[in-house]
Image: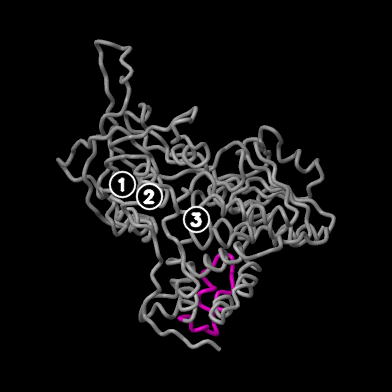
Amino acid sequence: MAQKNMSLTKCPMPSLAPDYRNKVFEEVATGYTYEMAIEEARRCLNCKNKPCVSKCPVQIDIPAFIERLANEDIEGAFEVINRSSSLPAVCGRVCPQETQCESKCVRGIKGEPVGIGRLERFVADWHREHATEAPKAPESNGHKVAVIGAGPAGLTCAGDLARMGYKVTVYEALHVAGGVLSYGIPEFRLPKAIVNKEVDNLKALGVDIETDMVIGKVLTIDELFEMGNEAVFIGSGAGLPRFMNIPGESLKGVYSANEFLTRINLMKAYLPSSKTPIRHGKKVAVVGGGNVAMDAARSAKRLGAEEVYIVYRRSMNELPARKEEVEHAQEEGIIFKTLTNPVEVLGFNNPDDPRDPKNGEVIGMRCVEMELGEPDASGRRRPVVKEGSEFTLDIDTMIMAIGTSPNPLIRSTTPGLEANNHGCIVTQGEDGLTSREGVYAGGDAVTGAATVILAMGAGKNAAAAIDEYIRGK
């Protein structure tokens, strides 16, 4: 039995220096060393009632994996994680552990909780670097299932079903698998080599992934059933960007965060050789306060922007982004203009020469200052306009990061598939069953934009329900 480490604080996460990393796309957090991981693992009290597990959407046996790590059985620790999670190296990097498993850690009562996410990342990385054998495909059970979308929900569902012996084919609209892990989260937070390795592990289990397959155009859900699939899981995400519907949003230099990040992450549009180059703004405003806004702002800084603003209508205390991401953004020089709301995007206009190439380009943003009033339906204090507070922010690029909704293509081509007023597919309880027999859904396609781990949890629940449904048949 390893001796306990009763330190009240976590072992700090090593990271690249801010004045270096804000110019490159290298991963910011460099990860624990072996010695750091063992010492942090020994802070865990291995509680009998496992309160941390109750807040893990995929139900990893957290004390069990940490106990093995504390005893320097790293492969044993990975085996525990791998029973529940198809994407451990991803979760260790992007899950909001501070509001999930770590929020229930007993060590957090009188100090800092155990760094559960950092330990999960260490174990997954160690396994990836030291494992000599790929996962083996289990014996087939003779049944076929189709999964729509190769993001966190779809990959998790596919992985769990493959381990049960199902023949699973994943249909992905883009040219690479990974969903938001590939197109949305930047390299400096989640290296794409890690995503690719996780996908390769699923392929080794027998999962087929077909890219450039837009379900609703190339094939319909009805046709997937005609091809012999006994169930279909929809994990197509929420990739339709929202805008504020203020004047000037159609000007050159206004992006949705989805487009901005996709062109950087997938299309490498920041390279001089790109056929569709991305705008290298010098003064950039990102509207929004979530993790996507932080990703867009930090990416703009790395593209050479001199000034990057986060424009958010509530205060710093209400920012929905992870605390770590906000701190990293501040360290990298991102300017936070909170209690601020845009009302118009201003564009260059030369009426004397309509051929002027600068016509229609962003030159500024009119904003108003806000103050917090009474709480709204979300429980947060509602922002209201402060009288006489209008001002202009000098910018040349604007990025909208105020949320996304599901693309209507699948629901509009699937008779009998019920959706709500927000365009999200309606399901019956946690198992993901939709209004169509044999059709299940989960992740952002059901909830709207949420976290990677919640999407994974939905994929996991749906896989169990699909297995029960098919065996019941």
Viewer-side label of 3, 2: 2
Using the image as rendered, state which of residue 405 and residue 262 is in the foreground: 262
| Amino acid type, label 1 | Ile
Using the image as rendered, state which of residue 436 and residue 158 is in the foreground: 158
Residue visible at 30% across and 48% down? 312
Residue 56 is inside the magenta segment: yes
| Between discs 2 and 1, the one toward the N terminus | 2
123 left or right of 31 in image: right
Residue visible at 71% across and 63% down? 133
For the residues bearing labels 2 and 1, Cβ distance under 8 angstroms: yes
Up the image or down, 206 lies above or below 266; here it is: below
Q: Position of residue 118 (x, y in %)?
A: 47, 67
As drawn, the label of residue 254 is: none
Residue 48 is inside the magenta segment: yes
154 left or right of 264 in image: right
> Under tag 2, what secondary structure?
helix
Up the image or down, 76 lies above or below 407; here it is: below
Report which quarter residue 212 is drawn in. Answer: top right
As drawn, the label of residue 294 is: 2
Q: Where is residue 213 in the image (x, y as percent from the top left)?
A: 67, 37
Report which quarter residue 261 is drawn in. Answer: top left
Up the image or down, 90 lies above or below 240; here it is: below
**What is the spatial separation of the Cα atoms under label 2 and label 1, in whole angstroms?**
8 Å
Residue under pointer 3: 451
124 left or right of 345 in image: right
Residue under pointer 1: 310
| Amino acid type, label 3 | Thr
Magenta span: chief secondary structure: loop
